[in-house]
Amino acid sequence: MPQSAAAPSDSALSTAQATARAVDLGPLPEWDLSDLYAGLDDPAFADDLKQAEAECRAFAESYRGRVAGLAAGDGAPDRLGTAVAAYEAIEDRLGRLMSYAGLVYSGDTTDPARAKFYGDTQERLTAAASDLLFFTLELNRVEDRLIDEAAAHPPLSRYRPWLEDIRREKPHQLSDEAEKLFLEKSVTGRAAWNRLFDETIASLRFPLRGEELTLEPTLNKLQDPDEAVRRDAAGALSHVFRSNLRVFTLITNTLAKDKEISDRWRGFTDVSDARHLANRVERDTVEALVAAVQAAYPRLSHRYYTLKARWFGRDSLAYWDRNAPLPKVEQRTIPWAEARETVLSAYGAFSPKMAEIARRFFDGSWIDAPVRPGKAPGAFAHPTVPSAHPFVLVNYQGKPRDVMTLAHELGHGVHQVLAGPNGALMAPTPLTLAETASVFGEMLTFRRVLEATTDPVQRRAMLAAKVEDMINTVVRQIAFYAFERKVHLARREGELTAEKICELWMSVQAESLGPAIRLDEGYEPYWAYIPHFIHSPFYVYAYAFGDCLVNSLYGVYQRANGDPAAEEAFVERYFALLSAGGSRPYGELLAPFGLDARDPAFWQIGLSMIEGMIAELEAMEA
């Protein structure tokens, strides 16, 4: 694969790691970021950065203080449409620059050159964007009647969904000066603390059996077939997290207080309300989801982990055995080529178009797969901007879960490609739907592999792994959400000690996992490494939202099974949902499937699918 600034060569790996990777996994792709820029010193990047700054200044000179006048009288749709189109073009250029800097940085967050490049780019783009702040603020001060009249006609009518979205922010917007201060201070505030977290996590090393591992390989050891390895890995994680709790506690306290200040100034009454607004979802809808999942804990996680403990011949399991592979089941390392074929064939069976889009990620070097020191942990699909294309990062180690992670991120990628034609302002998808394509892609892949598996032992192992993934996505993420709420509410009463945060963490974990998982000493600081708590407060419920939604959606698809016309109609509706991006609300997009997430009973549909899988596992045991 072509090299880029964000993809170090295998020399960054130890010889042993590189050899193991070559033997077990085959060649792993590294992304080629040259579709954005050729490298850190690419003159095109410097030129685009200067041009973006100039365009922001010119836009402000042309329109600041004049937006109300654009909306008055004849010709308003043309005048406003021209201004919004210019604003969108600038946003695309700014997004391209920041996307490249972020992707380069994620390739090795411990590299000082990349860190400086990322930080310098962020500072300059934040300063440039401050010249654009006035535009949406002034639009929101225009009388609703005038905006509605102008948005009824082209070219402004194209941007009606975006206008409606920004007007939802109207009750919480501040003066131009205050908004500019919030934006400019973010570089030395929230963004700086986010960066400190990322660089701290990437620099951690976990001593395990004579090796010094980074976070991702250490977490991977919790799925090792050898219980002693899992126990030692858990101990290493606990020790290193605890040794760094002072930093993680300070970051958590600072960001929670930062959010409280922002919420107070903007008039949000509940700690989660800003996230709900950003997600374009009603608070009572989220509360119904949370209540449904918490009520289902005994039927889902408690029940499953009791069953899993019996498989291990025990009454309960230590926390490090929660995701352990089942005993007496062969654990096979899955080469990258097989993972690729598995996902593409599953996507292709659903829709050749879906597989064709996903294949572009492999053929175009849009995926970065190897585990490397300093590389961002976990996985993500970055949409970049509509004028370019998404990129996917995974840390592939050949586990079955890694294949599902690849299917998940490629689902995001397909969604982002399809939403791109909506443009920079309307391609981004609210979190209420952002996890739909990813979880649906996982489900397609899982069902495809399960159908091809005839050995009953392997089928049970696969079904159990899927149940665990769904519990991690639904139960665990709602427990995370409950933990975040406790932290942010408690922080309003004063600074939290590390011990207090650990106590809050243990309270929600015990409730969600149930009595069959022993939260032995050492699990207390495991909250420290979860990036969503830092980067996107209250993001986590979107995973549960997406999983339950997809379970319902997949149920509709299953009912069409065997009827070519019904299947074709479903695929058409599904692609329409993904192609809408952020241009239509989730309720409107789900209506053609006969689904309504605002109905409290809706969540039971998705939860019952998980419950049915657990019952199937229990029947296998009988």
Image (cartoon, rainbow, N blue to C red):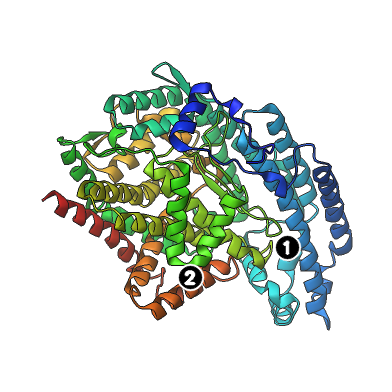
Say if 164 sits above or below 364 in the image.
Answer: below
Say which amino acid is labelled 1.
Answer: Thr
Q: Is residue 503 left or right of residue 71?
A: left
Q: Is residue 72 left or right of residue 571?
A: right
Q: Which residue is mark 1?
A: 136
User: In this view of the protein, which residue sits in the foreground, 572 or 581?
Assistant: 572
Q: Position of residue 218 (x, y in %)?
A: 42, 29
Q: Is residue 166 left or right of residue 444?
A: right
Say which amino acid is labelled 2.
Answer: Tyr
Q: Position of residue 169 (x, y in %)?
A: 63, 62
Q: Is residue 228 left or right of residue 571?
A: left
Residue found 84% across the figure and 49% down from its top: 53
Query: Residue 107 occupies which quadrant of the picture?
Result: top right
Residue found 49% across the figure and 37% down from its top: 26
Q: Position of residue 328 (x, y in %)?
A: 21, 36
Q: SS class of the residue under badge 2?
A: helix
> What whole-number distance in Å separates the C-alpha atoms at marks 2 and 1?
32 Å
Q: Which residue is mark 2?
A: 574
Answer yes or no: do the residues labelled 2 and 1 have beta carbons within 8 Å?
no
